[in-house]
Amino acid sequence: MDKNVLKFSDLKTTKRRMAILAVLENSALPMTAEEIYSRVINDVHMSLSTAYRTLGTLSEKGILLKNLSQDGKTYYQMNSHQHKHHLVCTLCNSTVPIDDCPLSKIEENLIQQTGFTITGHSLEFSGICPKCSKHSSDAGFND
């Protein structure tokens, strides 16, 4: 993790911030505060409330993206200033990243209409993954 990202945001470089950023930087998928906390607690001492405060600060400064998912949980991910798209299973919460951007034309139109400089966006589709679909049809739930 580059320490300059904190300095550019007028934040001190601390072990806690660096540990949290390292976890998120190495994750391909968004993570909850609890998931992040469970990965950093063995390396850096902090309480869960400190982890939440740190994630809040990093989100407010635009270093992280913070999204409330349909499962009611808040997920964090690095703000790479690129769009993010995911499929999320409503049964097992598995998440699959989507590489193609179905919003490119909408984004272009929004830029032209509003004059905004769009630095990124996030999109989440929910549904039932193939594994859960097979499990529910094998159990006779889809009859």
Image: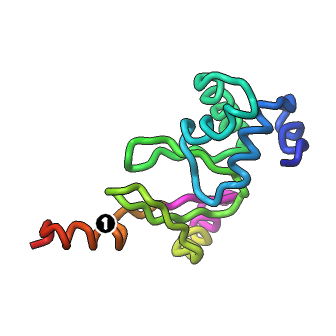
Q: Residue at x 59, y 68 (%)?
A: 107
**Residue carrying label 1:** 132
Q: Is residue 50 above or below residue 80?
A: above
Residue 67: give x, y in percent of width and height.
53, 46
Residue 110: give x, y in percent of width and height.
58, 65
Q: Residue at x 34, y 57 (%)?
A: 90
Name the image quarter holding residue 57: top right
57 or 91: which is nearer to us?
Answer: 91
Residue 108 relative to residue 1: left or right: left
Q: Residue at x 86, y 29 (%)?
A: 12
Residue 49: give x, y in percent of width and height.
59, 22
Q: Residue at x 57, y 47 (%)?
A: 31
Name the image quarter holding residue 63: top right
- Report helix, strand or loop for mark 1: helix
Name the image quarter holding residue 4: top right
80 or 97: which is nearer to us?
Answer: 97
Residue 119 located within the stretch drawn in magenta: yes
Residues packed near mark 1 inside 10 Å, few (<14), some (14 to 19) or many (20 plus): some
77 or 82: which is nearer to us?
Answer: 77
Q: Is residue 73 above or below residue 85?
A: above
- Residue numbers of the magenta segment: 110-123
Specify the farthest residue to the front. Answer: 42
Residue 130: give x, y in percent of width and height.
35, 73
114 or 72: which is nearer to us?
Answer: 72
Residue 46 relative to residue 32: left or right: right
Q: Is residue 100 above or below residue 129?
A: below
